[in-house]
């Protein structure tokens, strides 16, 4: 089963949209570290609409707690700083897709320690710094699900 992890997300509507995406695909969502909002925030609930009961949601105080919960997972880190495209990656059923916060991304030390599993979404316009977090999760999650035959 593919998992999605958000490390210190800051913007409630992004997390709400990602939660809705995870509910639609039956993908567990892991929220790691301090959040930039409360989970009962109206903005998060509004973005997730009435799908929150369908979300398989897990909270973790830190990344080590996430690792401990998913000992069999292969963690894949998404970053604009990565060199390898997600299009060149072979996803597996036990992958956990790890995304950073909207303003900071993932910590540099975490990326360096896992550089062989860091991926980026290629963009044609070099003047655009990054994509929206919810958009990025959707792009990579659907490719991972396609590759692992989740829709078969």
Image (cartoon, rainbow, N blue to C red):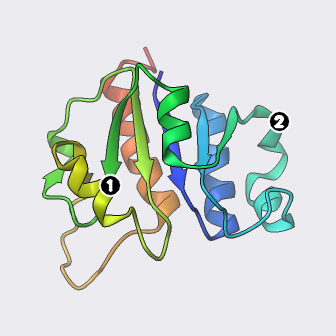
Q: Residue at x 60, y 32 (%)?
A: 28
Which numbered disc covers residue 94? none
- Report if residue 79 is visible in the image: no
Q: Quadrant of residue 9?
A: bottom right
Q: Nearer the viewer, mark 2 or mark 1?
A: 1
Residue 30 locus on image (x, y percent): 59, 41
The secondary structure type at the circle numbered 2 is: helix
Residue 39 locus on image (x, y percent): 79, 56
Between residue 62 and residue 90, name the one nearer to us.
Answer: 62
Locate the C terminus and report the quarter of the image it occupies. Answer: top left
Q: Do the numbered discs 2 and 1 sit on residues whose CB atoms are within 8 Å?
A: no
Q: Residue at x 45, y 60 (%)?
A: 100
Q: Quadrant of residue 44?
A: bottom right
Which residue is at the far bottom?
127
Between residue 46 and residue 99, name the one nearer to us.
Answer: 99
Residue 29 locus on image (x, y percent): 60, 39
The secondary structure type at the circle numbered 1 is: helix
Q: Residue at x 86, y 57 (%)?
A: 40
Residue 81 locus on image (x, y percent): 22, 66
Residue highlighted by disc 2: 53
118 shown above or below 37: above
Residue highlighted by disc 1: 110
35 to the left or right of 146: right
């Amino acid at each position: 089963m593919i998992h999605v992890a958000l490390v210190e997300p800051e913007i409630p509507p992004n997390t709400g949209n990602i939660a809705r995406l995870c509910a639609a695909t039956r993908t567990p969502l892991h929220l790691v570290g301090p959040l930039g909002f409360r989970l009962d925030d109206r903005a998060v609930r509004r973005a997730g609409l009435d799908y929150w009961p369908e979300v398989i949601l897990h909270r973790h105080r830190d990344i080590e707690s996430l690792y401990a919960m998913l000992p069999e997972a292969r963690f894949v880190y998404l970053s604009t700083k990565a060199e390898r495209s997600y299009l060149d990656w072979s996803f597996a059923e036990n992958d956990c897709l790890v995304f950073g916060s909207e303003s900071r991304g993932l910590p540099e030390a975490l990326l360096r320690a896992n550089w062989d599993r860091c991926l980026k979404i290629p963009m044609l316009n070099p003047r655009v710094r990054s994509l929206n977090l919810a958009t990025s999760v959707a792009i990579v999650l659907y490719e991972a699900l396609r590759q692992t035959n989740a829709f078969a």
